[in-house]
């Protein structure tokens, strides 16, 4: 167990809670066993990094984060949530840094920092960059090419790269460096045999859940997304992040004939375009995402206990009422408009037509306990 010689101002956890489960509770308890500092959850909103709608809306998941032990829940903007692991991590770490978190805790398969740090060092090297380009030129996807480069350079030391949570942890370490290195990483063993995918499948089959609102599944958005894509032109599609390498043209052709999102995804996917990348591209196009280098604001979703004090020290504008963000103008206003489009699209995934009404983003105020 960790034995830190100083206390922390705040500990951040970058999460999705899609859905909340026992593994998340175990992580929060391990953090509390280390420190009594306030825990900040930086959480994806209504869409998640795998390129899907979250099974439950962000308000209910933010409330769950408070129940787990967080004292502040802030939203990872959709442009970072629907992105590669590298940008997902960068957005989360930048927000943690903005509200003064000086530690970042995460669960991973290996449960220790040293092997992850070695991989982070290699990925930041010119040798890895050169090899990755070579493997991509040979037809590998970016993710496969980068893993291949690490394995070439590290040999047996590259073993942790095969763990999904290990690789996300590596991206956290790289993001901490890019943000100035002022955050202490805390690697904790991930609970075995806890699968968010399996829990979502169980819910889909009618399994019970502690969250009362009806779930949203990717296929619920078939008509909404396909309708949006069929009414876009190639110029609009090319503005979506990560739409290069011919993916835009493939997507436009496939959207004209596909009868479901699954059919569309399979038509666009190739050896180079992974399924996660394709799904993120499709939803990014439907929402109208545009590239933003770093999160332009801190958006509070839920506040408890010491959370309000952390917001007061934020180095970024704090958004509690989206309507007020419009007055800030520029990238802040544009980003809130993007979140509104994302929420309106998400609402169309409900089976209950009374829950599909638009405009709910503008009425969102943080949960305060």
Image: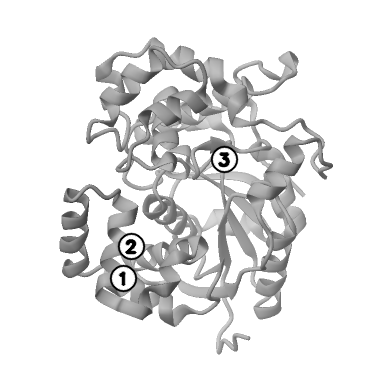
SS assignment at label 1 = helix
Give the image location of residue 168, x and y in percent: 46, 61
Give the image location of residue 32, x and y in percent: 70, 73
Q: Is residue 136 above or below residue 148?
A: above
Q: CA distance from mark 1 to mark 2?
A: 6 Å
SS assignment at label 2 = helix
> Counting other residues with Cα less than 10 Å from the Cα at mark 3, is it few (<14), some (14-19), or many (20 or more)?
many
> Counting other residues with Cα less than 10 Å from the Cα at mark 2, is it few (<14), some (14-19), or many (20 or more)?
many
Are the residues flagged by discs 2 and 3 in contact, CB closer than 8 Å? no
Q: Quadrant of the N terminus?
A: bottom right
Q: Is residue 92 above or below residue 215?
A: below
Residue 114 in view, yes or no: yes
What residue do we see at 72% from left, 40% from top?
60
Q: Nearer the viewer, residue 47 or 313?
A: 47
Mark 1 or 3 closer to N-term?
3
**In the rendering, which numbered label is found on residue 147?**
2
Are the residues flagged by discs 1 and 2 in contact, CB closer than 8 Å? yes
Give the image location of residue 351, x and y in percent: 72, 20
Residue bearing mark 1: 151
What residue do we see at 21% from left, 56% from top?
135
Q: Nearer the viewer, mark 1 or mark 3?
A: 1
Q: Is residue 112 left or right of residue 280?
A: right
What residue do we see at 51% from left, 62% from top?
165
Q: Nearer the viewer, residue 285 or 307?
A: 285
Q: Is residue 272 above or below residue 364?
A: below
What residue do we see at 77% from left, 36% from top?
205
Give the image location of residue 174, x and y in percent: 35, 66
Residue 362 in view, yes or no: no
Residue bearing mark 3: 45
């Amino acid at each position: 167990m960790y034995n830190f010689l100083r206390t922390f101002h705040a500990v951040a956890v970058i999460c999705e809670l899609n859905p909340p489960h026992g593994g998340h509770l175990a992580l929060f308890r391990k953090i509390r066993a280390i420190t009594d500092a306030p825990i900040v959850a930086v959480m994806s909103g209504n869409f998640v990094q795998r390129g899907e709608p979250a099974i439950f809306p962000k308000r209910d998941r933010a409330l769950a984060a408070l129940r787990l032990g967080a004292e502040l829940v802030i939203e990872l903007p959709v442009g970072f949530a629907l992105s590669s692991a590298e940008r997902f991590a960068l957005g989360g770490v930048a927000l943690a840094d903005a509200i003064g978190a000086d530690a970042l805790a995460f669960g991973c398969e290996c449960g220790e920092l040293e092997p992850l740090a070695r991989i982070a060092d290699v990925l930041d090297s010119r040798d890895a960059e050169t090899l990755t380009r070579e493997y991509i030129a040979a037809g590998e996807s970016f993710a496969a090419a980068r893993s291949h480069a690490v394995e070439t350079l590290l040999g047996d030391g590259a073993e942790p790269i095969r763990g999904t949570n290990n690789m996300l942890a590596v991206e956290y370490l790289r993001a901490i460096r890019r943000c100035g290195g002022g955050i202490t990483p805390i690697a904790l063993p991930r609970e075995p045999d806890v699968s968010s995918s399996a829990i979502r499948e169980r819910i889909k089959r009618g399994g019970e859940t502690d969250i009362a609102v009806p779930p949203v599944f990717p296929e619920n958005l078939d008509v909404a997304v396909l309708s949006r894509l069929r009414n876009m032109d190639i110029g609009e599609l090319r503005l979506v992040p990560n739409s290069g390498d011919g993916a835009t043209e493939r997507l436009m052709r496939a959207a004209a004939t596909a009868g479901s999102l699954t059919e569309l995804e399979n038509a666009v996917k190739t050896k180079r375009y992974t399924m996660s990348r394709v799904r993120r591209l499709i939803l990014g196009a439907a929402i109208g995402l545009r590239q933003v280098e770093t999160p332009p604001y801190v958006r509070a979703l839920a506040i408890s206990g010491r959370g309000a004090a952390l917001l007061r020290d934020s180095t970024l504008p704090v958004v509690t009422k989206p309507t007020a963000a419009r007055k800030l103008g520029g990238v802040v206003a544009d980003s809130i408009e993007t979140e509104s489009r994302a929420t309106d699209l998400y609402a169309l995934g409900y089976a209950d037509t009374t829950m599909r009404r638009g405009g709910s983003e503008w009425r969102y105020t943080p949960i305060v306990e």
